Image (spheres, rainbow, N blue to C red):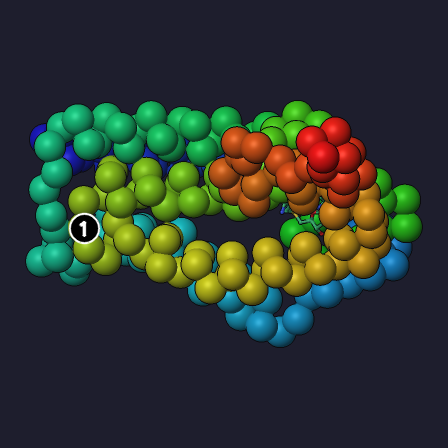
């Protein structure tokens, strides 16, 4: 009984997440990009992530084929899963709202591109990817099955590793020192508790101490 409630919560969350992404994609217009870093590997890994995010969970929800790999968590774990899913959806929506026209499904820089450092981007550089990680954790707590529960985490990891590295390289090439200083103040998907001192402040401190 409880597992079907958690599966229903997952399905509602999935629909909400799809609406957020659909609205963003509808607003997206292909502008003249000065840089495009999308490779065949990115496309392949994006497809793999969709398998873990869409195909496997719905295969589990709509057929009994994966039921042999079910596990059973206490009720509180499912409730935490629902809360984590809500935070994930909020973060996905907020990061789209803060990134606005700079969002792209591709790795690209537009002619009129500027660096967004406000809103959720003030604390982390990749709030959208953070939302995907939270989604993956929620999926494992709500769909209590070794296949469908962990498919998102397993299938998103390669895309995350490849994409974040080339995205940051691309942003650094475009924004230089502005991006380096932004990197020093923020974490990738977890906020930084402290930031590095700028070199001038460090030497200033040393001078005061000596
Ligand atoms: N990695 C970010 C954004 C993903 S969308 C996140 O997880 O929230 C990918 C596009 O966003 C890239 O094509 C890049 O041009 C753009 N982008 C990423 N970070 C940005 C920033 N801080 N300011 C402006 N554009 C950014």
Q: Residue furthest bottom?
A: 40
Question: How packed is label 1: few (under 14 Cα within 10 Å), some, or many (20 or more)?
Answer: many
Q: Residue at x 23, y 26 (%)?
A: 79
Question: Residue 140: x percent and y percent?
Answer: 27, 45
Question: Residue 170: x percent and y percent?
Answer: 75, 59
Question: Residue 47: x percent and y percent?
Answer: 50, 64
Is 150 situated left or right of 20 in this image?
left
Residue 12: image quadrant is top left
**Residue 51 position (above or below residue 143):** below
Q: Nearer the viewer, residue 95 or 202?
A: 202
Q: Which residue is mark 1?
A: 145
Residue 106: image quadrant is bottom right
Is residue 180 visible to the viewer in this orientation of the structure? Answer: yes
**Residue 1 position (above or below residue 42):** above
Question: Residue 197: x percent and y percent?
Answer: 69, 37
Is residue 27 visible to the viewer in this orientation of the structure? Answer: no
Q: Residue at x 67, y 56 (%)?
A: 167
Q: Residue at x 69, y 31 (%)?
A: 209
């Amino acid at each position: 009984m409880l597992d079907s409630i958690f599966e229903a919560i997952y399905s509602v969350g999935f629909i909400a997440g799809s609406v957020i992404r659909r609205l963003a994609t509808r607003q997206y217009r292909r502008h003249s990009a000065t840089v495009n870093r999308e490779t065949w590997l990115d496309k392949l890994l994006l497809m793999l992530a969709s398998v873990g995010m869409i195909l496997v969970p719905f295969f589990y929800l709509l057929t009994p084929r994966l039921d042999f790999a079910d596990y059973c968590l206490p009720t509180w774990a499912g409730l935490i899963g629902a809360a984590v899913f809500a935070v994930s959806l909020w973060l996905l929506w907020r990061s789209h709202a803060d990134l606005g026209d700079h969002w792209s499904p591709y790795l690209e820089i537009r002619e009129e591109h500027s660096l967004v450092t406000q809103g959720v981007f003030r604390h982390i550089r990749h709030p959208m990817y953070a939302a995907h990680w939270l989604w993956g954790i929620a999926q494992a707590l709500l769909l209590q099955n070794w296949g469908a529960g962990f498919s998102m985490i397993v299938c998103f990891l390669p895309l995350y590793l490849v994409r974040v590295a080339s995205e940051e390289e691309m942003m650094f090439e475009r924004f230089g020192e502005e991006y380096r200083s932004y990197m020093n103040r923020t974490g990738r998907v977890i906020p930084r508790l402290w930031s590095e001192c700028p070199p001038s402040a460090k030497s200033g401190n040393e001078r005061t101490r000596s």
